[in-house]
Amino acid sequence: LHYSLGPPRFDWEKLNGEPVRLNCRDETLQILAEPKLIEDIEFSDRDFPSAGRWTPSPQMDFPILADRLTAAEKVYFDELRREGASEREARNLALAVAHSLSGVACWPALVLDPAGELVVPSRGLSGVPQKSHWQTVLPLLAARPISVSAGDVVRFKAAVDLGAEVNTPPRYTFEAQLC
């Protein structure tokens, strides 16, 4: 969607930093790097950070993987052909879309026991789409998708501003750059 809709018909900057929310079964979101844990929240932890800025994880590098690009291209090609695109048109568009980056996808997994054996994931292993009532949140990195290739690295940092009051929602800040 981010790839196909752009100015003047649709201006993604009108979202004012609000992330795009997608169903966890939505296959138009293809994960181009191996997922990593951004934050681990344990509410019973006595050392849980208090109000103020918290950095849940150090800087992370997400290398773009060739096999993920190939898999994404196939998903887009098959969908475009189902929608009636010619083989040539579908191949060209699928290649371009598969090699574009919109944002860093985030989704929860709820761990229900201290041993970590009872886990309710919102996406499957390695970010594979699956049925879930939780959404995947996609903060956009730019107004238009960024072209990527295998071996490119997305360098990512996250910070959370925690409010002093329980009814003050946390505010997340994400920074990412393509290396």
Image: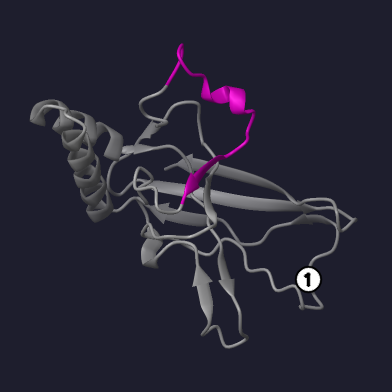
Mark 1 — residue?
48
Q: Position of residue 154 (x, y in %)?
A: 44, 47
- Magenta stretch: residue 20 in it? yes
Instruction: In this rendered view, identify the residue nearer to me: 13 or 28.
Output: 28
Q: Which quadrant does the N terminus fall into?
A: top left
| Scheme of image coloration | one colour
Instruction: In this rendered view, identify the residue nearer to me: 5 or 158.
Output: 5
Of all residues shown, which one is farthest toward the right? 165
Residue displayed at 54% across by 57% down? 134
Residue displayed at 53% across by 64% down? 37
Circle 1 packing at 10 Å, graded few (<14), some (14-19), many (20+), is few
The span picked out in magenta is 6-23
- The answer to which quarter of the image holds residue 16 is top right
**Total label count?**
1
Q: Which amino acid lies under the numbered mark 1 shown in the image of this protein?
A: Phe
Q: Position of residue 149 (x, y in %)?
A: 28, 42
Q: Which quadrant does the C terminus fall into?
A: top left
Q: Position of residue 80 (x, y in %)?
A: 21, 34
Please tell me whether mark 1 sits on a helix, a strand or a loop. loop
Q: Position of residue 47 (x, y in %)?
A: 80, 75
Of all residues shown, which one is farthest toward the top? 8
Vertical placement of residue 82 versus 107, above or below: above
